[in-house]
Image: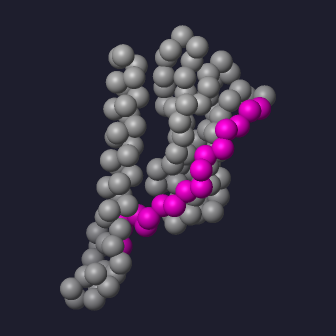
Amino acid sequence: MRFRYRVAAVSASLALAGAGAVSLAAPASASPSGHASASERAAAPALSCDAWQYQRGTKGHGASIKCYGSSFIGYAVCHQPDGYLYLRFGNRARSGGTSLVWCDRNAEVTDAGAIPG
């Protein structure tokens, strides 16, 4: 149960961080003066991703994900045979690119996604 709690907490944190970054994105025309404020210019644009793809290779098991709208970092929740769950992050990719994440050799990917980066 402890491991599931940790994964749920990490997943919730990532979801909230992603939702927070996406909800901050507002068009410049939303400003009453018609000019974008510094916080509006700094806000990350919405991130739209394709479904993640399971990967197998010489490095073990992993996941790849392609997103559009801003740069992003892929992540994967990895599950070892002994029940241990952990989170791995992939490379930072530009909009339209692919982020690839690898788990340890004996682990499987149970979930994957991306966060704005």
How many tags in the picture? 0
Vertical position of residue 32 compared to residue 60: above or below: below
Vertical position of residue 70 compared to residue 53: above or below: below
Vertical position of residue 81 compared to residue 89: above or below: above
Report x, y in % for residue 50.
59, 55
Report x, y in % for residue 34.
28, 89
Report x, y in % for residue 99.
62, 48
Report x, y in % for residue 84.
49, 17
Residue projecting furthest to the right: 58
Instruction: Please name the residue shown 71% across and 37% down the image.
Output: 55
Instruction: Please name the residue shown 63% across and 63% down the image.
Output: 96
**Quadrant in the picture for the N terminus:** top left
**Left-right relation of 87 to 98:** left
Residue projecting furthest to the bottom: 34
Instruction: Please name the residue shown 40% across and 37% down the image.
Output: 11
In depth, the one of 42 and 69 nearer the eye is 69
Can residue 88 be seen at all in this image of the molecule? no
Quarter-wise, where is residue 63 in the image? top right
Instruction: Please name the residue shown 39% across and 52% down the image.
Output: 18
Quarter-wise, where is residue 80 in the image? top right
Can residue 77 be seen at all in this image of the molecule? yes
In depth, the one of 12 and 40 nearer the eye is 12
Query: Is residue 24 rendered magenta in the image?
Result: no
**Left-right relation of 21 to 97:** left
Residue projecting furthest to the left: 32
**Left-right relation of 7 to 34:** right
Per the rendered image, the range of residues in magenta is 41-57
